[in-house]
Every structure is written in C-alpha cells, then in structure tokens.
Amino acid sequence: MATTYDKIATTTLGSAAASITFSSIAASWTDLRLVLVASVDTYSPGWIRFNSDSGNNYSFTNLDGNGSYASSSQYSLYSKIVAGKRSLQISSNWTFYTLDIFSYTGSTYKTSLLSESADVNGYGDASVQVNLWQSTSAITSINLLLSGTANYAAGTTATLYGIKAA
Amino acid sequence: MASTYALVSSQTLASSAASVTFSAIPSTYTDLVLKMSTRVNAAQGVDNLWLTFNGVSGTSYSSTWLYAPTTSPTSSSQTSDAYIRLTAATVADNAIANLFSNDEIYIPSYVASQYKPISSSTAPEANNANNNRLVNAGLFSSTAAISSINITSQAGGSFMVYSSFYLYGISNA
C-alpha cells in the first residue's frame, strides 16, 4: 500500500525558544497537517505565518467555547493567523492544536482549518477556526511565533505531516 | 521506513456491548487517534460518551466543550471528574434507523510523562431536533503513559451491533 501520510519534520524543544520554523517544505504532498503540543513561559497567543509573509494577507473566523459561553469572531487583514481565541497555556499546562492546510502548493489562495483544545481542570478552551492566506505562492515554510518576549517552553513538540492524494 | 499512520487495533461489534476497551496499547507511537461510529440502545436522541484511561476513575479528568445543537451554540465544562465527557457524541436508538455517529478523538504525546491533553470532534446528525456538533478539550491529569482506553455510554446503554472503533497510532520518529 502506498504511503499517504508522512512525517516531514518534527521539533521537540530542549530549551525555551521564541519561535519554531519548518522550512524548505517540499512540494511532494497534497495537504499538510501541523500538530502542536505547546506550553509557553508567558501568556501569549500562538501566531502562524506562511513563507515569512508579514503583510496584511491573513484572515480567520473562530468559533470558541470557554466552558461558560460560546462565541464567534472574525478578523480580516491581519499580519498573521492567531491560532485560537485565547493565549497558549503556561506552567507545564498544554495547549494542543492541529492545523490542516489544504492544497498548499496550489496557485489559489490557501485555506486551512485549525482545531484547538486546552483544558487545565479549572478552566479550558475548545475552538475551531477557518483561516485564509491570500497568496498564490506554494507554502514552503511555516513560522510558529509568539507575541512580545514569550517563549515556547521546553518539551513543546511540533510535527509537520504531509498527506498525499495521489 | 516505519509506517507513520498505522492501525493499532479495531473492533466492529457483532453483538451489543456495554463498553469497549482497547488494552495493551504499545508505546511505539507518538500520538493516538480513535475513530468511532456508534449507536447505543438508550432512549434519547443522542447520548454522551465517557472516556477513561488505564482503568483510572477518581477525579483525574476534566472537560471543556463547545456544543452546537439546532439552537445557539453553547459551552460548558466539568472539572475533577471521573471521566472525559464526550457530550452528545453518539446516536441513541430512538433516532432514525441506520444512523450512527461520527467521532474522532486525538490524543497527542500519550507516552510523555506529562498531563495528557485530549481533543475530540463529534457529529451525530440525526435529521431531527437532536442534531449536534461538538468539539471537546479534555485533560487526563496523569503523567503515566496511556496503555488502555475505555469507552462507555453515560445513559448506561450498550453499543449496538455494527458500532465500530478504530485506534490508530501516529509516529513522528
């Protein structure tokens, strides 16, 4: 049976880092899936950019539940995707998200779907989010960033998979 | 090269069962994905499922869920619980015939010596007022590797014939 789900690269941080980058992503697959299990040293949202593009080319719509109420919000002309509505967890609590990036080598704008969860036995967050990057370029790098001086904590793991349709 | 996404075990019920357990899960993978299509013989349109690991009960679980019935979406949570709650995750037996749920549970880093975050996405569309879409954030407050998974119905109903459960392992090695 042909392999359709491949690991492209993985990073497990041995020490704190301000960002995680997957670069030189080959055009060998149809879709990408990013899996992140992260903790940070200072509350910060997770930011995502493709090909290091910091222009106002991103938009996203989020449906979020925080255990008390549900809400939906939409953001346009952003310089990055903000992954989920709330900050990543700190102090060895973990936020987990998957990001599915469809047709990442196509010459159309790039859509992606994010599913985010973080429960810390006292409060939590579950959300789904659709994202758009208005670029016709193939995605060759993914930057996982944070705001201000925040760092991803040691033990944070990010893995990029490639999924083949052919 | 080792397979990145591999079937660990599967169960398709030939007779009803009060619960389903995957045991002796090897620590060979990085993440686990459980895909289920279920129906239970409880007398309500949809039913909640309970998830436990390693036979642990007590207060080691918590859940936050985002729930979209036919009316406005809502969110709720449960802390220090005896199981992870997969709210409205399965179809009960007074739903339309031949209908089963569609559920996926993702368990990352299941052998890591840290608390285990869980995410799930479920969608038992029942062609009536019991239409539901749920995403769930769960936590298993244990640093032990997950070696078994148990799934039961909150209403105490049994999983019906043809309910299917597929456990996959994903390796990033």
Image: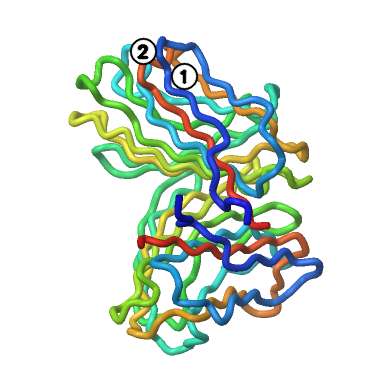
**Amino acid type at mark 2:** Ala
Whether residue B137 can be seen here: no
Q: Mark 2 falls on what kind of element?
A: loop
In the picture, measured across the screen, residue A91 lies left or right of residue B37, that is right
Corner quadrant of residue A101: bottom left
Q: Nearer the viewer, residue B137 or B38?
A: B38
Q: Residue furthest bottom?
A: A55
Q: Are marks 2 and 1 in contact (CB under 8 Å)?
A: yes
Q: Could you tell me residue B90's position as x and y percent?
A: 38, 27
Q: Mark 1 falls on what kind of element?
A: strand
Task: Please give the chain letter of the residue carrying mark 2.
Answer: B
**Amino acid type at mark 1:** Ser
Corner quadrant of residue B129: top left
Residue tagged 2: B42
Q: Could you tell me residue A3's position as x and y percent?
A: 48, 56
Q: Nearer the viewer, residue A33 or A126?
A: A33
Task: Please give the chain letter of the residue carrying mark 1.
Answer: B
- x 69%, y 74%: residue: A150
Whether residue B169 can be seen here: yes
